[in-house]
Amino acid sequence: MEQVQTKKSPLWWVPSAYFAMGLPLILINLVAPLMFNDFGISDAQVAFWTSLLILPWSLKPFWSPLMEMYKTKKFFVVTTQLVSGISLAFIAMALPLPNFFPYVVAIMTVLAFSGATHDIALDGVYITELDKTQQAQFVGWQGAFYNLAKVTAMGGLVYLAGILESKIGVLYAWVIIMLLCGILLTALGLYHWRVLPTGGAEVTKHSSMRETMRETWGVIVQFFQKKYIWIYIAWIVFYRFTEGLVIKIVPLFLKADTAVQGLGLTKDEIGLYYGTFGVVAFIAGSILGGYFISWRGLKKAIFPLCCIFNIPFVVYALLALYQPESALLVCGAIVFEYFSYGFGFVGLTLFIMQQVAPGKHQMAHYAFGSALANLGVMLPGMISGVISDAIGYEKFFLWALVGTIPAFILTWILPFTYPDPQEKK
């Protein structure tokens, strides 16, 4: 699959490849619960299995070193896109079966591991093929099209499922949706076979499984031996700490009755403000944030980006305090926060890419860094509901702002291991 080479602009493959990256996770994490609910699967089963199915995205650092020892990164990207496409087609075929649920979960397990493996390899291609200036320029496109998959799946595909349901019934509506997703990912795999650069050859040659495992352990150890690594780990975790606190609570706050400090929005309003306008704002912020870094340089931009990322969470404290009834005001606050979130998020992505990952095993080490970023969301998210229930939305969002302080301190003192190319200009 690595035969065809191209010198095309990264715009030929960055948007489409990162759209393909986002689709499997969104389908499992957000679309599958709606589908299973339509088929009468209990909430407990849906929550348990769809949560368990996203585990591979947290575990991907543990097999990322092995991927640097076999084939090219392009091989893994194209292969996993094809595997994911075929898996979705099998899901479509399994849905009409009488006892479909265990079969669909089993196929989705393959889809999950394929999607997580795709993430590792594609990030490896991006890091290897683009220089630091290009990485800054296109990191916004990367984040934007990854999130465009969410708009496509949760907006277009779910909407289409509703239309089809009224015409051909719920079963065949979801069969068509899964089949369309499978065709889309298969087509993207064939497209990227033509346009995607190789991402380089395997880093390490090996002769036995024992040698391979020793090399894998060495990759893990080398990550924790990097200069400033413990400062970097703390910074990565705390950069998203407040996001982790509020991300699970905001939809509940928007829906909750005004008598309990909520805004009393309907599901349609939440979907429109939060899931449509908010995501579009995130995409715009991501693209502009990437160009801001390429203009200022990462070292000069990182503290402003931390501020832009964290300070706008204040809008939720203000909404809880004043509980405005104006739809324009509420929607505007959410759009502002999501735009800022997208703008500032690219700083985290690029720092991991340019300061944490570089070295002999940069693809594997980037996977470690991105997993730590997920940890920064997961850990506070696990306790956010308990805190919110105990103190109420208004005080919760104020305390969440206090959680931004470590991020500001660590960003202010953040050392750079590698020179910023913009400093030489």
Image: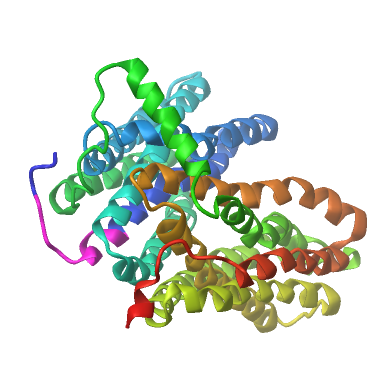
Locate the C terminus by quadrant.
bottom left
**Residue at position x 71%, y 50% in the image:** 381
Q: Is residue 422 above or below residue 82?
A: below
Give the number of marks: 0
Q: Between 66 and 137, which is closer to the camera in this rendering? A: 66
Q: Residue at x 16, y 46 (%)?
A: 193
Boundaries of the magenta span: 5-15
Magenta span includes 9: yes
Q: How far across and down, in percent of the image, does residue 22 sit?
A: 42, 51
Colour pattern of the rendering: rainbow
Residue 2: % across, % down: 13, 42
Q: Which residue is pictured at 34% across the width and 36% down the height? A: 84
Quarter of image, res 175: top left
**Position in image of residue 399 (x %, y %):** 83, 65
Task: Judge from the rendering whether residue 221 lies leftward or rightward of residue 130; answer left or right.
Answer: right
> Is residue 298 a member of the stretch shown in magenta?
no
269, 295: nearer the viewer: 295
Residue 123 visible here? yes
Q: Residue at x 71, y 62 (%)?
A: 250
Left or right side of 259 for 12: left
Q: Does residue 148 appear in the picture of this structure? A: no
Residue 189 is drawn in which quadrant? top left
Judge left or right: residue 298 versus residue 262.
Answer: left
Q: Is residue 272 above or below residue 48?
A: below
Which quarter of the figure is the N terminus placed in?
Answer: top left
Whole-percent x, y for residue 282 in the image: 50, 70
